[in-house]
Amino acid sequence: MYKNPNFLIALVALVVFLALGIYLGRQYTPALGVEFYSACARSMERIIAGGQGDVYDFAGVEEFEEPDVYNLALYRVEGDVITDPVFESVPAGLKDEQNDLSLQNHSWDVFTELIPPGNRQMVAQFNIFTDGVDNTLAAVDVIQEDISSWKLEVDIADLENKDAFIFTLIHEYAHLLTLDSSQVTPDQDLANDPYSLVLQTEKAVLCPNYFTGMGCSHPDSYIHAFHNRFWTGINDEWEDVDAIQYQPDANVNYYNALYVFYRTHRDQFVGDYAVTHPTEDIAESFTYFVFSPKPMGKSIREQKIRFFYEYPELVRIRSEILKGTCSPDN
Ligand SMILES: [Zn+2]
């Protein structure tokens, strides 16, 4: 067969070009343009503002009572949809919320519009609960019967403030991203008995990397790298504060001490809730990474936000979340 050398060179060049294109495509998300960011900037600012809590509003109060929590509907997740709801018995005043399947489905849709299907496969259950307006807006939990899967929980009473809801959903998603079985080895004993300090101490000793409280993190995990870089200098001081919550009737003392810790190290944290635990710090910092412009300063707070830019897959997820947040349909 006759071979045209020019054709071969062109073919090789084309293959190299395509391979490089694919490689670059893998390394860098097609950057969302300047126009996209300027159109999205207002929404991003609003969501960050919506996430400003008042964790320590009751610092100084004498007693703090946990609100009652009611589970309204537990769904199975099947791809993009939720199905087969199971209803618990609830007080008569919550029947309307329990029967509002359309609102429950809407709250799930907000989540799926933000997070692409390939990035939320660990979510196997979706729980609708309420503890009244505010308090807990959403949460994630390991499923005890299958500890590599997770349950996403949403308070049906807190959907009206959409910015706060989106901020919280991304905070919860950050927990899934940093704590799921690809990052932290799940532990059945800890899942069965999550509040046993004895068990936690036993397991922590056996973990050569950062121990999350729910399991031992992998050496190349986000949380291990984050803790190594940002927490070694403050960890002992923080552990003394953290231990207060396990003393009898310590709620108020604990929050007061935590607030002092926050004020002492304010320049290291994106917000007050971040000091409650390293796993909360990484979740809050990730949420700021998603909804803030890339910071350029030297403060530890800014370094924490920039930390996530070191992982191309997280930069890609950020773009996807922002596309979902700022698409014209939202
Ligand atoms: Zn959290």
Image (cartoon, rainbow, N blue to C red):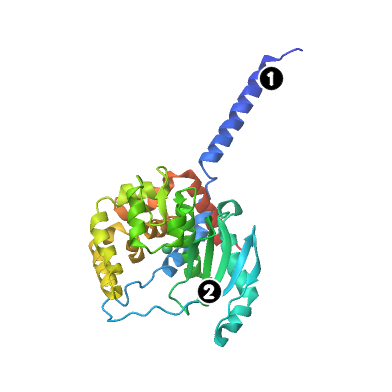
**Crowd rating for badge 1 (residues with CA inside 10 Å; few <14, some 14–19, many 20+):** few
* Quadrant assignment, res 71: bottom right
Depth check, front residue: 80 or 14: 80
Q: Residue furthest right?
A: 1
The residue under the point 36% across, 80% down is: 65
The residue under the point 30% across, 68% down is: 246
Q: Is residue 197 above or below residue 100?
A: above
Depth check, front residue: 312 or 242: 242
Query: In the rendered view of the protein, which quadrant contains the N terminus?
Result: top right
**Which residue carries the number 2 mark?**
129
Query: In the rendered view of the protein, which quadrant contains the C terminus?
Result: bottom right
Residue 280 point in image, percent of width and height: 38, 60
Q: Which quarter holds ligand 1?
A: bottom left
Residue 271 point in image, percent of width and height: 34, 64
Q: Residue furthest top?
A: 2
Label 2: which secondary element: strand
Label 1: which secondary element: helix
Residue 107 point in image, percent of width and height: 58, 69
Residue 74 point in image, percent of width and height: 59, 70
Q: Is residue 327 above or below residue 128?
A: above
Query: Label 2 near label 1: C-beta < 8 Å?
Result: no
Q: Is residue 295 visible?
A: no
Q: Is residue 82 visible?
A: yes
Q: Is residue 13 above or below residue 240?
A: above
* Quadrant assignment, res 135: bottom left
Q: Which mark is residue 221?
A: none
Q: Amino acid at mark 2?
A: Phe
The residue under the point 46% across, 59% down is: 191
**Which residue carries the number 1 mark?**
7
